[in-house]
Image (cartoon, helix red, strand yellow):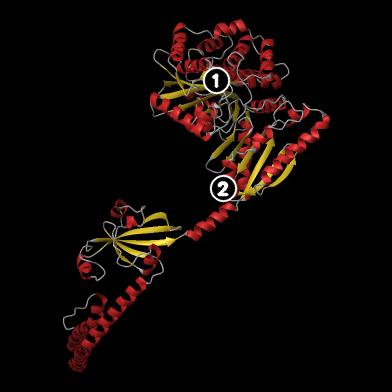
Amino acid sequence: MESLQYKGKLRAYLLAPIYIIIIFAGVDVALYVVSPLAGAIFLGFLVLYTAMVAILYRRFRNRLTEEIVNFATRYGTVQKKLLDQFQVPYALLDGKGKFIWLNQEFQRVIQKDKYFNKSVTSVFPEITPEIVMNSEDVKQIIRLEFAGRKYRVELRRLNMDPDMIQKNELLTVESAINTMNALLLFDETELYQVRQLNWNQQMVPAVVYIDNYEETIEGIEVVKRSLLVATIDQKVNQYFQQYGGIVQKTEKDKYLIIFQQKYLPELEESKFEILEEIRGIHLGNDNDVTLSIGVGFGGSDYQEVMEYARAAINIALGRGGSQAVVKNAQTVSYYGIHGKGVEKNTRVKARVKAQALREMMSTKDTIFVMGHQITDIDAFGAALGICVAARHMGKEAHIVLNTITTSLKPMVDMVLSQEDCPDKFIYTSEDAVYNLNDRTLVVVVDTNRANYTECPELLTRSNNIVVFDHHRQGDGLIQNPVLSYIEPYASSACEMIAEILQYFAERIEIRPFEADCIYAGMLIDTNNFVAKTGVRTFEAAAYLRRNGADMTRVRKMLREDMQTYKARAEVVRDAEVYRNAFAISICDPSELKSPTIVAAQAANELLDIVGIKASFVLTEYDKKIYISARSIDEIDVQRIMERLGGGGHLNLAGAQVEGVTLEETKDWIKKTLDTLLEEGEIEL
């Protein structure tokens, strides 16, 4: 006991009387100078105080030391006992991940005794030696499942004093290293169960529309109409009631359904079978009855999930109907899409959009019109149609165009050669951004994706945006347009603009060369009126013919040079037939001014080969790989292209990819086809 040395605050407390004696001695010297008598008296008291301190130190030092040692011993024993009986499973690992010590709760969890000293990986495969050795002072969080329970594991490195390790009775000589790892297990099974229960019981709203209610009802006998409507109601009610849903019919062709979120995975796994069940109803109706379903989930409150549902139904309708769209804040999933978009014979929507466009133009000074990157004939024709409407309103209009392809050049030259054509009728992206102001209306045609437009910066700088497009909606939509008219059933953007012009004004002047350009856009996108045409397509073509469109001039304008023709023939000749149904080919962009146009034309021609159900032509242009996908009626190429980040229509789609080679993209297409075939999304 005599050799025990005190440290820290305890030493300071014990030496305090000595410090006081020194201070008093200094005071006594000063006092003696002032008054020798007072100094002598104070010295007497100082001697007495010093004697008392010395006696007390000598008498109680051993007892104090003994009490301190006893306290430390009891404290260490209690601390060890508390740690061993700690209700949280706790273990110590050496630097390589072997167990050194386990408390009782940890032994109970892993069903091992306190002498178990194997690697932690033998118990928890998720905790590898690399994880243990790479652990830092900050704790690592690992979540795992063990014996049917879910645990959160906290792993923290402990740096130990070598002398302390050597004296610690818990550690063996083999495990006496400078680092250890503390491992704690927190059982979160009940927490997961409560979270899952809460997730399951969340309210999920679904909005269901009958796509072609009016067209179907008008086409059957009056006596059968009630029976058809009742059958549709019954099918919808029975389908959602089996998932515990509440069905409320809000309008003659609209339903609101509420069900618990736990049933959503089942609905998605079945791919919303109600879509196919409804199509099978035939009670005198010539057309198939189709539904569009919008489902919203994952919102912070009921209002937010309902907004997701409304957005989902808008996307479903914008993609042509006959499908279900499930949306939350991060993701959008699509189901169905096994048929083409439902064409609506009514033109009420076109008339309403035309009047809305007229009102917007009347409040602006200038109109900027742009299509997608590498503008094609359909986009240019539609843009020219918007300029016709702007001219009728007396507004200045400009087409934003960065690249003039060889196929587009005859059209552009013809427009620019007109005597009354403005000097700066064609704007580059830089010109458009420079001249943009609050009095400018930006009109986007033939695309609804912001990053596909000729100048995405215009969309971020302007709050006055109008969108006209005939492609199905997907990711990356143009945000917050003041007017959006997206009709996937339309054959082309030019068809939509031709309809808009009919209702824009009673006597709007369309010059013959302008009618030729719009007509050419329809001709190209329908492959000479063979693909994706409907009654309204031919009506729009007839309207343009009445305004001076001439087939001979259009044909001459669309002629191509010999080099382009040979390149397209080369693509068809070198095509690889995959799975006896898919034609995949690569278009060599060298010596071609417009390889993307050639690729699209070659994809169309490949469909003329017997047995080919879908074609894919790849070409590299401007450091991107462009994919043109086409089909006739059996394969939904839009779904395939969406897997590659693109989109489009059921029979006409495309995608743009970066950072990969042509061969890698070709393999990617093959793997995507294999995946979709395995999932049953497409069938041969």
| Badge 2 amino acid | Gly
Q: Is residue 68 above or below residue 333?
A: below
- Specify the quadrant that holds the C terminus: top right
Q: Is residue 320 above or below residue 133?
A: above
Is residue 140 among what the camera can see? yes
List the single residue furthest toward the left.
3
Q: Which residue is mark 1?
A: 399
Rendered location of residue 8, percent (x, y): 24, 75
Q: Is residue 673 above or below residue 607?
A: below
N-terminal of the pair, mark 2 or mark 1, is 2
How many other residues sit within 10 Å of disc 1, few (<14), some (14-19) or many (≥20)?
Answer: many
| In front of the other: 251 or 264 | 264
- Side of 201 relative to 289 (left or right): left
| In front of the other: 483 or 675 | 675
- Side of 45 relative to 229 (left or right): left
Secondary structure at numbered mark 1: strand
| Badge 1 amino acid | Ile
The nearer-to-camera label among 2 and 1 is: 2
Rendered location of residue 29, percent (x, y): 17, 86
